Image (tube, grey):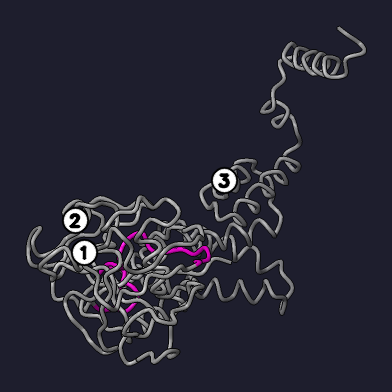
Amino acid sequence: MVINDGRTLTMSIVMTLVCVLLSLGWSGAGVAQDLPPEIMMDQYLLEGTEALKKGEVDRARRAFEKIEALEVEPPPVFLFTYGRLLVEQGKTEAEVRKGTGLLKRFIVKEAKGSERYTSTLKLLSRASEHLACQADAHCRAEAERQRQRQELIRDGFKMVSISGGSFSMGCTREQRDCHDDQCPMHKVQVPAFQIGQYEVTQDLWEAVMGGNPSSHNCAQCPVQNVSWRDVQQFLDALNVQTRGQYRLPTEAEWEYAARGGRQSQGYKYAGSDTPGLVAWYEMSRGNTSHRVGQKEPNELGLYDMSGNVLEWVEDCWHEDYTGAPANGKAWDLENSGDCSRRVVRGGSWNHSGPGDLRVAYRDWYTTGSRLPFHGFRLARTLP
């Protein structure tokens, strides 16, 4: 041992302690097993409550099951916390009944009128309704549909974070054959934001809105026949259910993402110079929309930015880019904007040639238009 080397001394001490502990047959598990059951219970209770705060339900379950295995009288906080978990997220009728029993044991010990006393009464009422529903086949089937619906709304779409940056919007060199409405080319600084990896699917629309307006019924295909106004209603409903603050992308955000953001390779279409690799359109195959994510993604991992369905964006229509915002925000009434018409981007399966699939391509429809090649994808502002 080199005494004047602090790091060497510390390491030697640690290794010595490890050797001593191993020689005594001790381990972390052994130490925990040697603790009194009451202390072990406190440890597991802390582990379970911390797991719940992080949304780690299965880890919390395992911690609470360890408390049950100790065979000691648990504290009221355990009865309430584990009982609530089983009533709210029980996977079987037996688990809900078990949670009900724990809550009943808790409530007789809790002071009447307290916040947890009132919460427990509500949980017991909910559990009673759930158990009654389980006895009715129709109610049980509807409850399962609602569970699947909520699961889809929670997990049925993926947002991609896009780093902010500056880009040239409109008729850049590789686009060629541009229309007047894609000029003049102009620089735009886009803040960071999120955009949907896929177009909004029919199953997500149905989960949120309770119906499917699409003429081509296909759960994982883009929703069709939705107007700009319909999309606003969908966003309102989705945000109420998720508190997610979702919205349509602005036109500048959409084009920045379609071009690949900071990873842009300067392609003509979203992810390639060969349209058939990245886009469904009339000349490639079929006469309808297709399942999302079947073609190759662009540089940011976004699918179907070219083709499949036209995508509504937030902006009002302007005949060209004269006076367009340089900050990436939506362009409203300024400079003779017409907000009875809204911009669509990306081309669709209904377009006969690849020119309308270019990342600079833009068009408009009235806010009430519903056509089988109209769809959209989500966006969200980053904090």
Q: Secondary structure at mark 3?
A: helix
> Residue drawn at (15%, 67%), measured in percent from left and top?
349
Q: Which corner quadrant holds the N terminus?
A: top right
Q: CA distance from mark 1 to mark 2?
A: 9 Å
Observer-nearest residue: 68 or 30?
30
The span picked out in magenta is 189-211
Q: Magenta segment: does it hold 196?
A: yes
Q: Residue type at mark 3?
A: Glu
Q: Tell me if mark 2 has few (under 14), some (14-19) or many (20+) residues whose alpha carbon lies within 10 angstroms of its own.
A: many
The image shows residue 198 at horizontal and vertical percentages of 32, 61
Q: Secondary structure at mark 1?
A: loop
Instruction: Examine the rendered structure and indicate whether residue 339 appears above or below residue 61.
Output: below
For disc 3, the marked residue is 65
Instruction: Examine the rendered structure and indicate whether residue 174 appears above or below residue 180.
Output: above
Q: Residue furthest right?
A: 4
Can residue 135 be spotted in the picture?
no
- Give the label, 3 or 2, closer to the camera: 2
For disc 2, the marked residue is 275
Q: Tell me if mark 3 has few (under 14), some (14-19) or many (20+) residues whose alpha carbon lies within 10 angstroms of its own.
A: some
Q: Are marks 1 and 2 in contact (CB under 8 Å)?
A: yes
Q: Residue type at mark 2?
A: Pro
Q: Residue furthest top?
A: 1
Mark 3 or 2 closer to N-term? 3
Q: Tell me if mark 1 has few (under 14), some (14-19) or many (20+) residues whose alpha carbon lies within 10 angstroms of its own.
A: many
Mark 1 or 2 closer to N-term? 2
The image shows residue 70 at horizontal and vertical percentages of 64, 41
Q: Which mark is residue 307?
A: 1
> Residue drawn at (20%, 79%), measured in percent from left and top?
225
Observer-nearest residue: 366 or 212?
366
> Residue drawn at (66%, 44%), measured in percent from left and top?
44
